[in-house]
Image (cartoon, coloured by chain):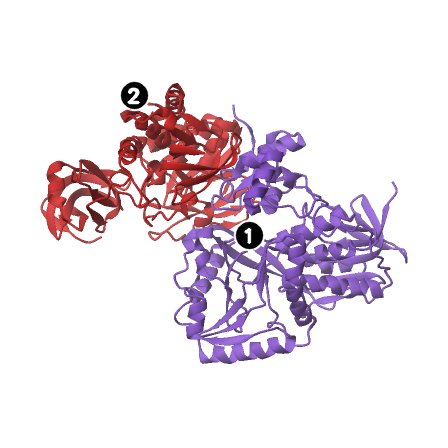
């Protein structure tokens, strides 16, 4: 069988792989993305704090600091272009003691050195005006107006949908297990499946070290899987916080944050515990208690009874503490995008630029593509029923009456939206894929009402029996079989 | 589009309210029922077990039968209804935004609205169970729907968490369909649902019921493979060292119901934080004049019989309202609760020219008591007292406001419902 050859192959469809694919798609480059999971954003990008950090955390002079501040500045335009929900809600780092105040001063100085705009330390009075629910014990806060929030997997979908629309090929369930190099082409194998490329971008997240190992390279640091657990609160609790609220960091770490999400929920978390398995996204009773305690330091009366779901994500923490984005020291045209932990989401737009620059300096010719489509699909950025204006709703329904049938009542997702998600440039095939694209099942009933109807729509679309519809991966059938 | 009366929801509350409107003299053509599902009947459709209709029909039938009887009556009267139709919002001016295959995206202006949206299940998030998020985890209501309406099984070996009536009925249903229920876990020391259900649904099917036990972890990568169960202490905390792994391919939980009132978030209707339903007067009218509510949207009911009563009250109240939309109450009496009382509905009594007419105050207590005395106090003075005897949170208590009692209530700003536990005949204690 002939092996398909590409100019560039990107390993991983997390946020770093997605932004790289998006940037490459603008040029006449034959490119592919190899993803081990069944969908875009299957790893760390799927479960994190969804924060666009301003950039005062990273030490001056680090790559992390540089890309964070730049990424944060680029985020607004990028999300606007792709129709991704983003809000520049700002962040507050809250101090309780004089010691904390000193620390806030340090953070402010560091942020200013990093180029973070408009940082300001405010007193108790202003703090409580901005955030009335914050504990009365809080005395000061560092305000970063440039910080924001974005939905990480929605951003990754948007980037990949745009890339796919512009000709980038996506391979899912392609877990690279072997890489050969003949001096010109890298051949990447997943069992019997093979593709080859002149340039490889290793954006495998938690697995960058393993991919590097496949070409016989040892990265100059280790990747430690650190799990962060979260609670997501019902939309009714949106009044809890209007900015992202952090506590002053201590030796123990960054602490628990409380933040609104772009979809109107409140996210609380994360803790940070080293786990043995990179795939361990389980939540623990102790972990949830830890988060609850941490959250109550910031907002004492936070209503955690309104938790609609709990989840965990695993971060790829490099022992070096900094991002590592460069061409392999041993292998030409093999680029590592490694150690991208927080603020990887905020930095993504800048990571994309940075990777493109490296590819260019490696000799990859960048000729602009004629007929480039700047939106998610050739018909623009998909808008869901709940995002439409009245006029758009009327139009959508007259074109397709399925837009008049609400399937997820919590998030106002219609059958028309679900069908659209099943037919996007990177199509959904399972209930969770539909959920992450449309929000159907993400609301306060967590899909208990709509899940079976969505499964029916998937079964109809792909002409498969209902019992064959999956939650996510291939052995995750939702229903068992027919009744007696 | 204009319509005199719009009823949102076609469960027992909505349908009986529509029929009751007609009985009180409203023209059937003045009514529109909006239902988001494809059939009338609401949750009744998935309740294929018996136990419905006692007070309304004078016989006990299944939920499905009651739904079809009520729907037939609606069709016979030619009351208009639209199915597969979802209300997006309701505003103070009684304009209803709705999407429906029949009318598309439209606004309906109503003179009176009845909110009969019923309730929804709380989710597993509230339980904060550890572990993974594989396929095969369902709420009890979702399973009832999947099995009874779609004809599919959630799995063949199931662990159930919660011993409310719904959870027990679902456990029995799975057993009847050839599934096996490994166990039902109940964090409390007693069953949440009725003793009859423990016998009929669990004991008779040899399904073990573990008290003071909860599920602490969900195990499995893609499809659920097992759960970890643990004993819990009196405060509901799991006890370390008591963990036990139980293999299963599905997990069903019931963690309670909550009134579904999302669409009225921006209507300006005041909600009671205890019931999660609207504040109502004895006519089940909300603080927005002309907007009424009944059924599980008001509070979670133990029996459909009470929903029937409320729906009938609302039917008559709507008629009265339409006759004189400007009538204003002369005074209002707030109904407060002492400890031991979980909540009471209505939350206030309105007095019109004709005085406070005969009505009912429904209430629930917050525990299980052997000998309870219920009193009503006005300015500290007892104006009503009734020995209730045994009572638990499972049942609804009623205080009938007769002419005589209404006379005593008259003039009060507020009255307080009190519950005292009588010990050894005369002693009463006031502790909660």
Q: Colour of chain A?
A: purple
* Mark 1 and mark 2 residues within 8 Å of each other at the beta carbon: no
| Classed neighbour count for the residue bearing mark 2: other residues with Cα under 10 Å, few (<14), some (14–19), many (≥20) | few
The chain holding disc 1 is: A
Q: Relative to A319, is A214 on the left or the right?
A: right
Q: Is residue A52 above or below residue B83?
A: below
Q: Residue furthest top?
A: B76
| Classed neighbour count for the residue bearing mark 1: other residues with Cα under 10 Å, few (<14), some (14–19), many (≥20) | many
Q: Is residue A458 above or below residue A200?
A: above
Tell me residue A120's x, y (percent): 53, 75
Residue nearest the viewer, comparing B126 with A149 = A149
Q: Quadrant of residue B298?
A: top left
Q: Is residue A112 visible?
A: yes
Tell if the residue under mark 1 belongs to the same chain as the one under mark 2. Answer: no
Circle 1: element type: loop
Q: Colour of chain B?
A: red
Identify which residue is drawn at 54% across, 68% down: A254
Q: Which residue is mark 1?
A: A282
Give the Cα separation between the discs numbered 1 and 2.
50 Å
The chain holding disc 2 is: B
Q: Which residue is mark 2?
A: B59
């Amino acid at each position: 069988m002939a092996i398909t050859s590409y100019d560039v192959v990107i390993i991983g469809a997390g946020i770093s792989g997605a932004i790289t694919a998006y940037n490459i798609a603008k040029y006449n480059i034959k490119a592919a993305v190899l993803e081990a999971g069944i969908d875009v954003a299957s790893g760390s990008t799927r479960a994190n704090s969804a924060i666009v950090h301003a950039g005062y955390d990273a030490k001056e002079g680090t790559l992390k600091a540089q890309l964070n501040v730049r990424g944060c500045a680029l985020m607004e335009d990028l999300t606007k272009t792709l129709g991704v929900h983003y809000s520049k809600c700002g962040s507050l780092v809250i101090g309780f003691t004089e010691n904390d105040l000193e620390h806030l001063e340090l953070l402010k100085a560091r942020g200013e050195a990093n180029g973070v705009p408009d940082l300001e330390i405010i007193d108790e009075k202003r703090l409580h005006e901005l955030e009335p629910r914050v504990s009365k014990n809080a005395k000061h806060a560092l305000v970063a107006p440039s910080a924001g929030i974005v939905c990480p997997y929605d951003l990754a979908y948007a980037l990949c949908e745009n890339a796919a629309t512009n000709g980038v090929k996506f391979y899912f369930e392609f877990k690279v297990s072997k890489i050969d190099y003949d001096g010109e082409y890298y051949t990447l194998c997943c069992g019997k499946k093979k593709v080859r490329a002149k340039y490889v971008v290793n954006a495998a997240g938690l697995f960058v070290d393993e991919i590097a190992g496949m070409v016989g390279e040892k990265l100059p640091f280790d990747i430690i899987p650190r799990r962060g657990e979260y609670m997501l609160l019902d939309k009714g609790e949106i009044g809890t916080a209007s900015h992202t609220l952090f506590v002053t960091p201590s030796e123990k770490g960054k602490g628990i944050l409380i933040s609104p999400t772009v979809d109107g929920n409140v996210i609380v978390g994360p803790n940070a515990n080293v786990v043995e398995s990179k795939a361990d996204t389980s939540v623990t009773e102790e972990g949830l208690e830890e988060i609850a305690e941490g959250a109550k330091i910031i907002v004492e009366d936070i209503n955690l009874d309104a938790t609609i779901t709990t989840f965990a994500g695993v971060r790829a923490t490099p022992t070096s503490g900094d991002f590592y984005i460069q061409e392999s020291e041993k292998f030409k045209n093999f680029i590592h995008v490694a150690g991208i932990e927080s603020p990887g989401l905020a930095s993504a737009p800048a990571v994309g630029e940075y990777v493109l620059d490296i590819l260019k300096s490696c000799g990859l010719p960048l000729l602009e593509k004629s007929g480039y489509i700047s939106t998610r699909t050739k018909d623009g950025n998909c808008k869901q029923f709940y995002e439409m204006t009245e006029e758009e709703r009327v139009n959508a329904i007259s074109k397709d009456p399925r837009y008049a049938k609400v399937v997820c009542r919590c998030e106002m997702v219609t059958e028309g939206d679900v069908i659209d998600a099943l037919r996007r440039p990177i199509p959904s095939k399972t209930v969770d894929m539909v959920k992450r694209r449309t929000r159907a099942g993400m609301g306060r009933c967590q899909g208990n009402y709509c899940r079976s109807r969505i499964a029916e729509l998937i079964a109809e679309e792909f002409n498969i029996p209902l019992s064959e519809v999956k939650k996510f991966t291939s052995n995750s059938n939702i229903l068992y079989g027919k009744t007696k | 589009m204009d319509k005199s009366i719009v009823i949102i929801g076609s469960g027992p509350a909505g349908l009986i309210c529509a029929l009751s409107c007609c009985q009180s003299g409203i023209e059937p053509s003045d009514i529109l029922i909006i239902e988001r599902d494809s059939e009338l009947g609401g949750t009744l459709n998935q309740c294929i077990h018996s136990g419905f209709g006692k007070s309304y029909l004078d016989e006990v039938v299944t939920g499905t039968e009651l739904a079809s009887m009520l729907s037939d009556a609606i069709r016979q009267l030619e009351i208009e209804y639209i199915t597969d139709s979802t209300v997006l919002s309701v505003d103070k001016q009684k304009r209803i935004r709705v999407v429906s295959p029949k009318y598309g995206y439209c606004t309906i202006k109503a003179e009176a609205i009845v909110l009969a949206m019923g309730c929804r299940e709380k989710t597993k998030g509230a339980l904060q169970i550890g572990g993974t998020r594989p396929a095969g985890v369902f709420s009890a209501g979702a399973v009832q729907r999947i099995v009874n309406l779609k004809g599919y099984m959630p799995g063949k070996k199931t662990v159930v968490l919660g011993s409310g009536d719904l959870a027990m009925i679902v456990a029995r249903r799975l057993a009847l369909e050839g599934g096996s229920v490994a166990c039902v876990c109940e964090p409390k020391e007693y069953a949440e649902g009725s003793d009859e259900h423990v016998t009929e649904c669990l004991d008779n099917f040899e399904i073990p019921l573990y008290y003071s036990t909860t599920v602490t972890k969900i195990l499995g990568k893609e499809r659920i493979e097992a759960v970890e169960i643990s004993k819990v202490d009196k405060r509901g905390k799991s006890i370390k060292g008591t963990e036990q792994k139980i293999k299963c391919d599905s997990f069903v939980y019931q963690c309670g119901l909550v009134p579904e009132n999302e669409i009225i978030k921006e209507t300006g209707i005041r909600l009671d934080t205890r019931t999660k339903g609207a504040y109502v007067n004895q006519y089940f009218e909300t603080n927005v004049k002309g907007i009424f509510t009944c059924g599980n949207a008001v509070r979670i009911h133990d029996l459909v019989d009470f929903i029937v009563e409320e729906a009938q009250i609302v039917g008559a109240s709507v008629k009265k309202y339409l006759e004189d939309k400007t009538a204003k109450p002369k005074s209002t009496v707030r109904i407060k609760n002492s400890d031991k009382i979980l909540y009471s509905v209505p939350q206030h009594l309105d007095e019109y020219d004709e005085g406070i007419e005969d009505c009912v105050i429904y209430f629930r207590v917050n525990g299980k008591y052997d000998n309870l005395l219920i009193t009503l106090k006005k300015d500290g003075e007892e104006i009503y007292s009734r020995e209730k005897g045994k009572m638990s949170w499972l049942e609804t208590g009623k205080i009938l406001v007769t002419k005589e009692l209404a006379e005593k209530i008259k003039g009060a700003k507020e009255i307080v419902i009190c519950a005292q536990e009588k010990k050894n005949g005369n002693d009463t204690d006031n502790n909660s």
